[in-house]
């Protein structure tokens, strides 16, 4: 804009308006009120910078009224205003080069930053990705948060005033010089420079026909869109031009007329031009001194004319102005400096010389744009809140409270040179695995890379850093909380809840190796009630239980011992790949006792974190031990699945009872002297903590002392006395008669009082320093810092004496008992399991397990014999130090369950596993369906002479139904992100003979009965119809999942090779682990690297000339087709070798692309010969 000839107050700003504008004063990034700018007796409330319209003011629809006004910087003139074209924001720039944005009609401050050090901001233009700011000789682009994207300086002597976007990536800049510059915003380079007449271009507009350039001489020129040459010229005013606007076929301009020696005077006639005839029409007389004007086309093409003093008049460009249409902007005596209209034409913005921005609107619910995108707001700054720091907390970062950095005073971290001499660290020791496998040739050693370190890196690890923060080989960040700042978050990454990131390929491209570099198998967490994964791992790593459940097999459909045996068999076979506990959890959900105890969670409780997992897992621990005790004491040792002599064992003691059971004597003593004694068997003990007042200081207790009082419990309660024949206060005491092989302890830290007790005891133990190291089983090289939050010992000595009763004390882990102590019946108990509850406000928390894995497990998996502590967090498994297993910082890691095992206890158990699944499972069995008849049988069971042998081929196909739909979210870019996959259940399993005279004839075709709600039968893809799985109305051969599972397990254990299409997913849903050598998958046989997988239907049409899967899928047909395709693959391989097979596959892919992978709808016979002639004759 041209300021020449305006009111004198607009040229050189007097100090009374804005104070001193010295260049040395640094502009404020967060402006506040300056009391020196106001006269005496004037006070402003800094909290009231944003002044809302009082509630008594009602906006009349269609008439503009003030909606809001806000002060940016008091006394600093607002030189530019602009409504954001993409978001609901209003931008302003002031005379000192500072920019501020306000959000929405409430004018809440969004961002504020310095654009130029001294020059005023003359034009603002919003882009898709940022905002352009034009000053005198500089163009700067910033993000809406203030980050500079680019800075384009002009030539010396430039005096830019106007900016015009010609397209999305090109901008024109003009000013009081003899040229206009075109700049490409992608490359930030000048593309063209157009010469114009002196004194230059101050205002620019654009239509589909012309560029319109306003000059300070009072002229408006119309220029060609390509060459920028002048096509027409309007001599609007004799003095100067202040503003003009173009709409449709009309151009309206306002300006100043020359008054001879008196200088310039504001002309109250607006010049209006008709662009069709390129001539002036009748000038429009207005009642104010116009400084700005804009077309506001709503119902009509009306004009808004604004004066310097704040008067606003609306009129039609071809009509007469009405005095009644004049409004006044309340500027409190200040002058208007800038003006803009929103793209929706619903809002007007005015900037005055006092630093105030006024928002006017014709509707109370105003929107600046018709279609605004959502605005991203900055996260609340933690530093602004200045939280109270707990100086006693080791992990709390002191940088939460910022301190000013001064150059005068030395910092505490500026150590003198004498104390800051460099001291190189020693190289870390060579991995023992490398030394063990190294072969020496001359003086050079060669060893295989164990892949425990990143390539070409030697990390230096400090124990404190390793425990409190993330080390170099920590797992990658889970999708939950990916933007979390690690130093501000208390829970170490490896303890946080892990989730599987699903892609369009499902789990195929998810790298579980990042989370588990061991050969032990993790468990997937996305199944309902998978909170117990950690306890399943605990039971698996107790050798007697692992052998017991794998030897167990009974006829109950839902037996947790059987399902644990199946699951443990998969964990044995896995070499680091995660497994699923889906079948075990399915059986778990059917147990009435589990439901009665509240152990079965709703999906909403698991996802929202409402479940109290610490208390829940302790109840689950009690339930599973009791359930396994009941299920296994009925049947001891291997037994045939279907045997005529089903000799159930007596109520004798089970392995669970021998392992965990402890005979206790409960005594009740009434005050009348009557004593009642009862004996019972308990499988676990619950910790009881001493009562204390919250005001009193918690006393110091030894863990062994608290454990003894919890086992030999004494408490007073009301009980029925048969002697008194009424309820009387009684003293109940409990004593144990024998020691269990495995001592199970529920910690019961379920309230703040118990957590505080645990924390205080750990702190007291920590102050003891190295004395604790020797007393509680830690080695002397264990530093005191490593024993923070440690209260429980690694080893306990327990014995039952005739005089003292139960005695418990802490013991050094490395020492053994003397012969005298062993003769007295003393035993050492080593800590083998701790299960903590991880408190995490973001995810609702999770459960993990620290397990001391024994030598036999390492021998089977890795071929070495040693013991090691591991962290099990679903599919995350990581070796840890033993001190980490006993550290419980109750602010985020609450103890839940402890397992102490008697040293060398497993030597008295039979640890051999005899597979209880024999060939009888394949014999004929009755269907569960009432309507099934033999004439409808779709398969012929195997005869005894047909029993499969190792290496035999079996065609397999399975069909599934959906129990729970997939949960997904749609990202802003249109892609879909799977949060939780659909839960599938196997509905039909078919196995066909792969060789012999009956090749292709099914010997298993089982429909699986389900008691769970099916949400989608997927009939089009599975062929399963409603009613097929219902025993009351089904006509199919209906069996239980366990029955069919045993058949497949027998085939796998026998060593048969399964042939099918997409078997990986089938085995995953069935919950079977099959070695890769036993799977022949046609989806991989007929596949080229980095190409799409091909459907069975297309392969059958191309190679076998078969048209399958017409309306629905049939598993018998699919299994036979897969077998035929495998035979065809063998024929092609024998005929030409790998190169010829590759050429054939390239032809297959080429044909598929031509047909868009759709089988043509033609009659069978003939088309196949044309496609692949050599395939005929199968």
Image (tube, rainbow, N blue to C red):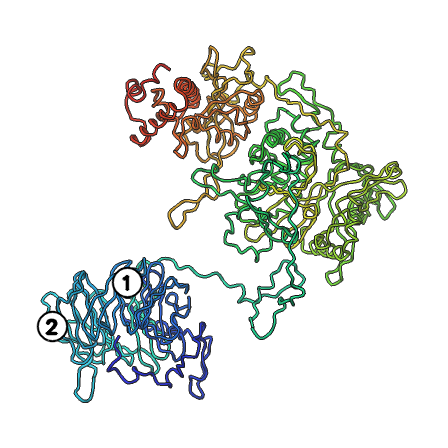
Quadrant in the picture for residue 73:
bottom left
Q: Nearer the viewer, residue 1012 or 642?
A: 642
Q: Residues within 10 Å of mark 2 (few under 14, many from 20)?
A: some
- The quarter of the picture where the N terminus appears is bottom left
Q: Position of residue 519 (x, y in %)?
A: 60, 35
- The quarter of the picture where the C terminus appears is top left
Residue at 64 percent across and 22 percent down: it is 916
**In the figure, is residue 942 to the left or right of 1146?**
right
| Mark 2, residue position | 280
Q: Position of residue 518 (x, y in %)?
A: 60, 38
The residue lying furthest to the front in this view is 442
| Mark 1, residue position | 190
Residue at 25 percent across and 69 percent down: it is 174
Are circles 1 and 2 on residues that touch, CB within 8 Å?
no
Separation (CA) of disc 1 from disc 2: 36 Å
In this picture, is 1132 found above or below 484?
above
């Amino acid at each position: 804009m041209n300021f020449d000839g305006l009111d004198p107050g607009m040229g050189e700003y007097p100090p009374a308006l804005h104070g001193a504008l010295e260049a040395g004063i640094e502009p404020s990034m967060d402006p506040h009120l300056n009391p020196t700018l106001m006269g005496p007796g004037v006070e402003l409330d800094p909290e009231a910078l944003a002044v809302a319209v009082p509630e008594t003011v009602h906006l009349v629809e269609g008439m503009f009224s003030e909606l809001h006004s806000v002060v940016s910087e008091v006394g600093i003139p607002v030189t530019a205003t602009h409504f954001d074209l993409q978001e609901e924001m209003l931008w302003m720039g002031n005379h000192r080069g500072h920019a501020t944005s306000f959000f929405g009609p409430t004018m809440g401050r969004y961002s504020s930053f310095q654009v130029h050090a001294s020059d005023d901001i003359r034009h603002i233009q919003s882009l898709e990705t940022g905002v352009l700011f034009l000053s005198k000789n500089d163009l700067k682009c910033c993000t809406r948060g203030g980050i500079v994207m680019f800075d384009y300086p002009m030539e010396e002597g430039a005096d830019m005033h106007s900016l015009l976007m010609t397209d999305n990536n090109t901008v024109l800049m003009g000013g009081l010089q003899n040229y206009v510059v075109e700049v490409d915003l992608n490359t930030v380079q000048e593309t063209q420079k157009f010469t114009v007449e002196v004194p230059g271009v101050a205002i620019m507009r654009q239509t589909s026909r012309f560029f319109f350039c306003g000059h300070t001489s009072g002229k408006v020129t119309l220029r060609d869109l390509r060459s920028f040459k002048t096509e027409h010229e309007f001599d609007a005013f004799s003095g100067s031009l202040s503003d003009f606007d173009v709409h449709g076929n009309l151009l309206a301009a306002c300006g100043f007329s020359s008054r001879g020696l008196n200088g310039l005077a504001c002309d109250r006639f607006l010049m209006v031009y008709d662009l069709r005839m390129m001539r002036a029409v009748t000038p429009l007389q207005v009642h104010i001194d116009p400084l700005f004007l804009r077309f506001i086309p709503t119902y009509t093409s009306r004009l808004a004319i604004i004066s310097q003093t704040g008067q606003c008049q609306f009129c039609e460009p071809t009509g007469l102005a009405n005095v009644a249409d004049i409004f006044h902007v309340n500027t409190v005596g200040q002058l208007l400096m800038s003006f803009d209209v929103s793209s929706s034409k619903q809002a007007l913005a005015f900037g005055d010389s006092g630093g105030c921005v006024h928002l006017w609107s014709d509707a109370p619910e105003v929107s600046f744009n018709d279609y605004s995108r959502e605005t991203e707001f900055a996260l609340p700054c933690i530093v602004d809140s200045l939280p109270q720091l707990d100086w006693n907390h080791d992990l709390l970062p002191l940088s939460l409270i910022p301190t000013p950095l001064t150059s005068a005073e030395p910092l505490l971290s500026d150590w003198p040179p004498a104390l800051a001499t460099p001291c190189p660290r020693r190289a870390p020791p060579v991995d023992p695995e490398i030394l063990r496998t190294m072969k020496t040739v001359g003086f050079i050693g060669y060893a295989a890379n164990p892949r425990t370190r990143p390539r070409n890196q030697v990390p230096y690890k400090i124990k404190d850093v390793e425990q409190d923060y993330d080390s170099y080989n920590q797992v990658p960040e889970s999708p939950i909380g990916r933007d979390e700042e690690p130093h501000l978050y208390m829970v170490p990454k490896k303890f946080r809840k892990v989730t599987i990131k699903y892609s369009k390929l499902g789990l195929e491209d998810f790298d579980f190796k990042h989370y588990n570099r061991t050969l032990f198998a993790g468990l997937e967490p996305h199944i309902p009630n998978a909170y117990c994964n950690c306890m399943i791992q605990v039971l698996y790593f107790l050798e007697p239980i692992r052998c017991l459940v794998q030897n167990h097999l009974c006829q109950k459909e839902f037996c947790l011992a059987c399902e644990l045996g199946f699951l443990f068999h998969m964990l044995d076979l896995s070499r680091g790949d995660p497994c699923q506990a889906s079948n075990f959890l399915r059986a778990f959900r059917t147990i009435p006792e589990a439901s009665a105890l509240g152990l079965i969670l709703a999906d909403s409780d698991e996802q929202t974190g409402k479940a109290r997992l610490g208390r829940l897992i302790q109840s689950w621990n009690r339930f599973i031990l009791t359930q396994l005790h009941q299920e296994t004491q009925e049947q001891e040792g291997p037994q045939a699945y279907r045997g005529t002599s089903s000799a159930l064992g007596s109520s004798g003691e089970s392995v669970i009872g021998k392992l965990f059971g402890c005979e206790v004597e409960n005594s009740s003593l009434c005050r009348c002297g009557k004593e009642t004694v009862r004996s019972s068997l308990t499988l676990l003990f619950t910790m009881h903590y001493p009562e204390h007042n919250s005001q009193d200081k918690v006393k110091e207790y030894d863990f062994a002392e608290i454990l003894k009082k919890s086992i030999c419990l004494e408490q007073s309660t009301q009980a029925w006395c048969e002697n008194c024949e009424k309820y009387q206060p009684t003293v109940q005491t409990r004593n144990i008669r024998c020691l269990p092989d495995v001592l199970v302890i529920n910690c019961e830290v379920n309230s703040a009082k118990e957590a505080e007790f645990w924390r205080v005891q750990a702190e007291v133990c920590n102050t003891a320093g190295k004395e604790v190291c020797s007393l509680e089983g830690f080695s002397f090289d264990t530093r005191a810092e490593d024993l923070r939050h440690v209260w429980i010992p690694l080893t306990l000595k327990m014995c039952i004496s005739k005089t003292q009763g139960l005695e418990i004390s802490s013991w050094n882990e490395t020492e053994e008992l003397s012969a005298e102590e062993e003769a007295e019946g003393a035993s050492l108990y080593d800590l083998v399991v701790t299960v903590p509850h991880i408190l995490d406000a973001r995810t609702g928390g999770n459960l993990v397990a620290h397990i001391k894995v024994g030598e036999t497990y390492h021998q089977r998996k890795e071929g070495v014999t040693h013991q090691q502590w591991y962290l099990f967090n679903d599919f995350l498994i990581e070796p840890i130090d033993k001190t980490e297993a006993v550290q419980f910082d109750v602010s985020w890691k609450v103890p839940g369950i402890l397992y102490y095992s008697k040293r060398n206890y497993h030597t008295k158990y039979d640890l051999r596993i005899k597979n209880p699944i024999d060939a009888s499972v394949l014999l004929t069995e009755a269907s569960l369906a009432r309507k099934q008849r033999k004439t409808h049988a779709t398969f012929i069971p195997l005869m005894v002479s047909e029993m499969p042998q190792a290496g035999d081929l079996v065609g397999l196909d399975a069909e599934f139904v959906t129990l729970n739909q997939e949960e997904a979210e749609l990202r802003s870019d249109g892609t879909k992100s799977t949060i939780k996959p659909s839960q599938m259940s196997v509905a039909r399993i078919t196995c066909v003979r792969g060789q012999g005279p009956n090749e292709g004839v099914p010997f298993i075709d089982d429909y699986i009965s389900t008691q769970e709600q099916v949400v989608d039968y997927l009939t089009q893809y599975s062929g399963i119809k409603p009613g097929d799985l219902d025993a009351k109305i089904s006509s199919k051969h209906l069996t239980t999942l366990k029955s069919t599972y045993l058949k497949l397990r027998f085939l796998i254990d026998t060593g048969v090779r399964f042939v099918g299409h997409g078997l990986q997913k089938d085995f995953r849903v069935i919950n079977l682990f099959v070695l890769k050598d036993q799977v022949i998958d046609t989806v991989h046989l007929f596949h080229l690297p980095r190409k799409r997988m091909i459907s069975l239907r297309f392969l059958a049409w191309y190679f076998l000339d078969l048209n399958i899967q017409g309306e629905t899928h049939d598993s018998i047909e699919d299994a036979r087709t897969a077998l035929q395709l495998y035979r065809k693959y063998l024929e092609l391989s024998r005929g030409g070798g790998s190169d010829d097979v590759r050429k054939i596959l390239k032809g297959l892919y080429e044909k598929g692309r031509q047909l868009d992978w759709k089988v043509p709808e033609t009659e069978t016979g003939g088309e196949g010969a044309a496609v692949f002639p050599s395939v005929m004759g199968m």
